[in-house]
Amino acid sequence: MKYNLVSNSVCKDEYSELLARIDSNSDYWRNATSPVEKKLRGQHFTPLSMAVQLSVMSSPNVSAKSVIGDPGAGTGILSAALASRLQNQNLSKHFSIYGFETDQRLHDDLSRAWSFFSSQAESNSDYEIQSDFTVHAKSLLERGEIDGLSKPDFITTNPPYNKLSSKEPLSLLLKKHGISSPNLYSAFMVLAAKWVADDGHLLAVLPRSFCSGAYFKDFRKFLMENLSIEHITLYKSRSCFKNVLQENILFYARKRKQVGRIRITVAKDPDSKPEYDLVLPSADILNESHWSLPRTVKDIHLYLKNQKRNRTFPDAGYRLSTGKLELHRQSGHLTTKVVYSSDFDNAGNWTWGEKKKPRFLETNSKNRLSLPTSGGYVVLKRISSNDGDEPKRLMPAWLSRTTIGDDVVALENHVQYIHKMGEPLSEDEGKALVEFLSSDEAQAVMRTINGTTQINKADMDRLNIPWG
């Protein structure tokens, strides 16, 4: 896979007063809304810098008038940033803006934001505010239209992040049309993709978690079948939203056949200038099982090196299981030594760092792992993150009678262990596996394909092994 380095994205906007005013409104409502209500609404107000970065990711042609849809509009920061960019670069002079926002408290600020933009831009623009975007799901899924509204040339959205119960009417309606949507944000994206005009532009702020794992496989497939994914911005920080820890991406696609190359921009955070852009073949980035999103040129080389290896993790007979002990559910009468994720450090040394939780518990046989007289298992910390420049995602250690001084243990469920079809590994093989999983190559693969804080079986199964 060849790659090209291209110039950094430039984030400029002359409508600073307008955008600063909207950003101030977002700060007000962010502080005025309780954590319980934020969670109920799935509401995260987009920072100004992120909105501006998203607005410059599209590559539109010049048009006399543009129609913009803004599902989950909030205070209007995304649609205002996009319209300002189009106006500022003489790409469009007049606008129709359709906003959807269920939080009625925000409607006045939303209306004032667009009115102020229209007067400042001296454009003949109109706007309309509706409440719930999903009430149009039936017409969008069947006809790709919302009665009374034009199909948008642009849709820009930071959708709500709530989970979507499989029993909710929206979920059932999506399933009727052959679409599985486990979260509200994926439902918004499906409906937005149906609504946007042919060759139109879809821009979104999304959690990176949908990029891997079986949970979102159908959603990734839908996006790949209905859109051309053309530009993704990755942030090295998980603190892009105030008081929220979550890895986010900026997503740009067009409603057309997939183009041959995808641009990936990497930045520390929304307030930082992008470090570089990579232009990569789309076939090497997108597949139904996962989207490969490298963060550095070094990671690209290491990822490609691993992909050339012939034997996968499961091909070698390795299986990943999670510790069965849950402290709040444990029961039994067998006194057992407990192993926690903090008991071994990032370098694989046994430090027994857990000092607050009980070291021995009464448990049952199902929660116990017997250690052989020779050999053992490789353990991993289940939780890690992509925060920082080169985060270490895999933190293995060798678990045996020799290393921990016991012949049976209970692994707490934040610890995972690697075995061979239920059987232990030999000491030589186990220590070789610890060394490989600690290598730059294995770390680069996991950074590239894993979009969550959890090391999961599906991602481990895509790691290729350098022996066998």
Image (spheres, rainbow, N blue to C red):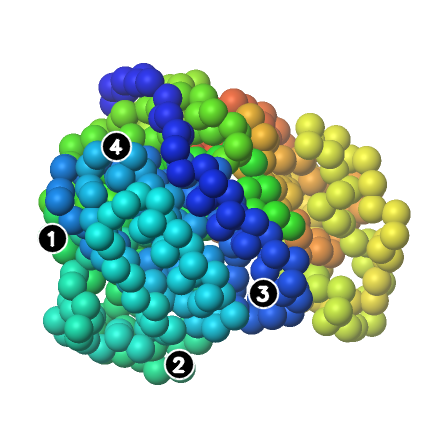
- Tell me whether circle 1 and circle 3 mark residues in contact (CB < 8 Å): no
- Which residue in the protein does label 1 denote? 198
Q: Amino acid at mark 2?
A: Glu
Quadrant of the drawing holding the C terminus: top left
- Residue 200: % across, % down: 17, 49
Disc 3 residue type (three-letter): Lys
* Disc marking residue 89: 4
Mark 4 vs mark 1, foreground winner is 4
| Mark pair 2, 4: CA separation | 43 Å
Across and down, in percent, residue 345 comes to: 73, 34
Query: Residue 38 got which mark?
Result: 3
Which residue is the site of mark 2? 168
For marks 1 and 3 on the same chain, the one whose residue lies earlier in the sequence? 3
Among numbered discs 3 and 2, the one appearing first in the sequence: 3
Tell us which disc is closer to us: 3 or 2: 3
Q: Quick one: label 1 or label 2, which is nearer the N terminus? A: 2
338 horizontally vs 43: left or right:
right
User: Which secondary structure, mark 4?
Assistant: loop
Mark 4 or 1 closer to N-term? 4
Q: Residue at x 77, y 42 (%)?
A: 343
Secondary structure at badge 1 equals loop
Is residue 36 in view?
Answer: yes
Above or below 364: residue 314: above
Q: Please tell me how many numbered marks the rendered image carries.
A: 4
Three-letter amino acid code at the position of disc 4? Gln
